[in-house]
Amino acid sequence: MRASRCGEGGRLERAELQETISQRRSFGWPKPVAALFGGWRRALVTFAVLALIVWLGVPLLRWLLLDATWQGSSAECTARGGACWAFVAAKLRFFLFAFYPADGLWRPVVVCGLLIALLLASAMPRLWSARLVVAWPVVIGVCLALMSGLPGGSVVSSNQWGGLPITLLVWMICFTTSVPIAVLLSLARRSRMLLVRWLAIGYIELMRAIPMVAILYFATLILPMALPGSVPLDKLPRAIIMVALFWTAYVAEVVRGGLQAVPKGQEEAALALGLGYWRAMRLIVLPQALRAVVPGLVNLGIGFLLATSLLAVIGIMDILSAAKAAAADPEWLGYYKESFLVVALVYFVMGYGGSRYSLWLERRLGSSSGR
């Protein structure tokens, strides 16, 4: 006991000595200030970073705000030399909805509102129930009907869809379709049945070895030849099907990591209580596994949101393609920087919001499980 107390006393004395030395080196400044200027090395690095920020930030600020043109024509933007936000204001409708007919513009607006409301409702754990599971296909079906011109309007081909509704629809349909299939695929990869396990491994490794661009070209060029002539499918649904199957392999590996994190004794205890394999998975194992991989799933979802820009290679006009096409208008030619900044802001809001939600949900689920 005496030896342990002596050891603790020695550690406390060393800690106090180190704190005293650090205070002397930082000249008694507060900790945030001392972290930046405590010592000549830190001060030198701080001043170098500040100089770099000023060197890059002042011209950027002048271009973004001070010399920017907020209203006017392309000639006025060229004369001022700053950012042409007048171009963004003139082309904002095209950014968001591309070539969708102007007389039915309320339809993509309602679709975006419904999809965002569905995402916000799904983000609230107190609303997680069977009703929410039913709401997903119902809302997506209503959105597809509205985009098609139904009910009561003229039919709008999916080739005319574009902008933000396409980005949200493809992202939400593919990712939410891939999650339940991925859960089954991850269970199949851990199955004791050799044939089932080999088929699951082969599918996952094959999809992960193929780039997404090749999958999109397959959906555009090869898949129509494999379908019978009585099954006409537009380019967009073919791309959605193949992209969903592609991302299923990635989600399956994330879910498999969560399943491996659950102690095997959990499943054995559930089986010993007579629950059966599927009930043990549904009630005991999968809730713990999915809770453990929430950060991985959100990170994968954000990556997939950014990957929807690859739809441009097969002529599907997402929000990035619409912004690029707007800058090719002869009346507003060459304002690509402004276009890409607007799209980057949209992606940043969705990606940053998803990352913060992931941290909040991880804390919420961790506290509810008693960890």
Image (spheres, rainbow, N blue to C red):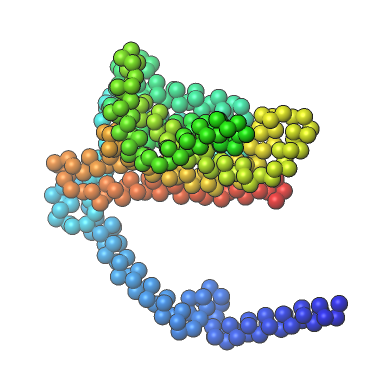
Q: State the image quarter where residue 275 is shown.
A: top right
Residue 127 in view, yes or no: no
Residue 186 in view, yes or no: yes
> Toward the viewer: 252 or 97?
252
Q: State the image quarter where residue 50 is shown.
A: bottom left
Side of 161 where 25 appears, left or right: right
Identify whether 313 is placed above or below 352: above
> Toward the viewer: 198 or 151?
198
Identify whether 161 is placed above or below 344: above
Q: Residue at x 65, y 42 (%)?
A: 288
Q: Residue at x 69, y 30 (%)?
A: 277
Which residue ends up furthest to the top in the rendered image? 230
Side of 310 where 123 appears, left or right: right
Q: Residue at x 38, y 16 (%)?
A: 151
Q: Residue at x 62, y 44 (%)?
A: 260
Q: Where is residue 370 drawn, in percent x and y?
A: 72, 48
User: Which part of the image, by quadrant, shows the N terminus?
Assistant: bottom right
Side of 19 where 67 appears, left or right: left
Which residue ends up furthest to the right in the rendered image? 1
> Toward the viewer: 124 or 137?
137
Identify whether 71 is placed above or below 203: below
Q: Where is residue 190 drawn, in percent x and y?
A: 59, 37
Q: Where is residue 186 drawn, in percent x and y?
A: 56, 36
Q: Where is residue 250 drawn, in percent x and y?
A: 47, 41
